[in-house]
Image (tube, helix red, strand yellow):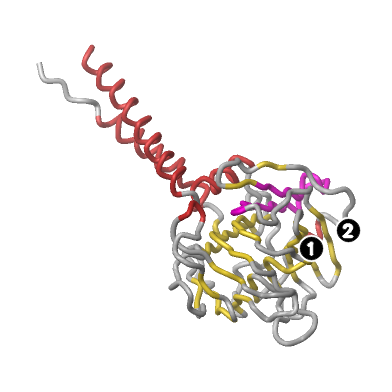
């Protein structure tokens, strides 16, 4: 007798695998800058946004790396070639609308390949333009700092120590949840690499301001690789001689859902590495195949 597998069971199994692999990327993703889609060696005019909102960035002095200098040794990456923090190099958009407004919880993930010592350059800035409402991530050789101004009042927390200088591609993630009751629960920094899983190392001691003050205010501008006031002024805060790759911002304007879990942060790291993404796909397909085979045999025995 010819036995036909029960596709009513197999198809949902395949769908479940697909949903589990993509859920973290669709629930709260605000913007996603691949940073590997421009021509090598030319000035950047627009950094494409493949997230759920059309917040493209205009490039000012940024260039693309050579082929093969992206994460996993494939593709290209965005290069910020500033020699000191006093440079106007940046990517920016001054019309973000309400994309980042009022976020009570949010997550920033990305990769950096740091070739020179850093001195508090701004890895990312989201603001209302005058700085009274402004979230900034400060970059140093062995730690990150988040500072958020809400109504002109600053709240700040530093990460634990993790050496990023001349370490190749370093994966970083920052989760903020302004609804928590302690800074340790409200702010978490994760670090990893192409071969090391994302790990929460704990935060530095001390903090400034309040946990509620970490919520975003009314914003209109996003800047990558510098502060908002980048130009010829002496208060520029460019990151120095570094490559950037795959920057993502997740967020929610209510509750805690914008602060991703440790497992979700690690999943994002894995998807950016060509080899691990392929392995995960193969393992996932193999798992579905084994499940299908078991269902087929069970159906055949009936």
Count of labels in the image: 2
Residue hosting label 1 = 147
Left or right placement of residue 58 versus residue 1 in this view: right
Span colored in magenta:
168-191
Q: Residue furthest top?
A: 301
Is 264 drawn above or below residue 170 in the view shown? above
- Tell me the tag on residue 233: none
Residue contact at pointers 1 and 2, CB within 8 angstroms: yes
Residue hosting label 2 = 208
Asked where in the image residue 148 lies, by quadrant, the reply is bottom right
| Neighbours of disc 1 within 10 Å: few (<14), some (14-19), many (20+) | many
Q: Residue furthest left?
A: 1
Q: Position of residue 153 (x, y in %)?
A: 86, 68
Kindly identify the residue that appears in the image at 61 percent across and 51 percent down.
171
Q: Position of residue 203 (x, y in %)?
A: 80, 47
Q: Position of residue 147 (x, y in %)?
A: 79, 63
Mark toward the start of the polypeptide (1 vs 2): 1
- Quarter containing the N terminus: top left
Left or right placement of residue 300 versus residue 79 in this view: left
Kindly identify the residue that appears in the image at 40 percent across and 43 percent down.
278
Q: Nearer the viewer, residue 135 or 218?
A: 135
| Neighbours of disc 2 within 10 Å: few (<14), some (14-19), many (20+) | some
């Amino acid at each position: 007798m010819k036995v036909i597998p029960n596709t009513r069971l197999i198809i949902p199994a395949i769908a479940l695998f697909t949903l589990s692999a993509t859920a973290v990327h669709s629930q709260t993703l605000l913007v996603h800058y691949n940073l590997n889609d421009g021509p090598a060696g030319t000035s950047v005019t627009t950094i494409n946004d493949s997230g759920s909102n059309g917040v493209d960035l205009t490039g000012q002095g940024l260039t693309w790396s050579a082929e093969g200098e992206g994460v996993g040794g494939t593709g290209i990456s965005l290069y910020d070639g500033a020699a000191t923090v006093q440079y106007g190099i940046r990517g920016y958009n001054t019309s973000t609308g309400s994309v980042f407004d009022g976020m009570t919880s949010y997550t920033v993930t990305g990769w950096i390949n740091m070739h020179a010592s850093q001195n508090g350059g701004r890895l990312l800035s989201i603001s209302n333009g005058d700085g009274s409402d402004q979230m900034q991530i400060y970059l140093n050789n062995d730690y990150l700092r988040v500072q958020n101004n809400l109504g002109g009042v600053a709240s700040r927390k530093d990460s634990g120590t993790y050496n990023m200088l001349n370490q190749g591609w370093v994966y970083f993630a920052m989760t903020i949840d302004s609804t928590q009751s302690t800074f340790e629960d409200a702010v978490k920094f994760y670090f990893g690499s192409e071969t090391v899983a994302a790990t929460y190392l704990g935060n530095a001691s001390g903090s400034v301001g309040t946990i509620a003050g970490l919520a975003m205010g009314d914003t209109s501008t996003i800047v990558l690789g510098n502060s908002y006031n980048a130009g010829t002024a002496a208060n520029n805060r460019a990151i120095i001689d570094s490559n950037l790759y795959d920057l993502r911002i997740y967020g929610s304007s209510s509750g805690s859902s914008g602060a991703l879990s440790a497992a979700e942060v690690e999943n994002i790291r894995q998807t950016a590495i060509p080899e691990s993404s392929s392995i995960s796909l193969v393992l996932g397909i193999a798992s579905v195949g084994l499940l299908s085979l078991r269902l087929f045999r069970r159906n055949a025995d009936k």
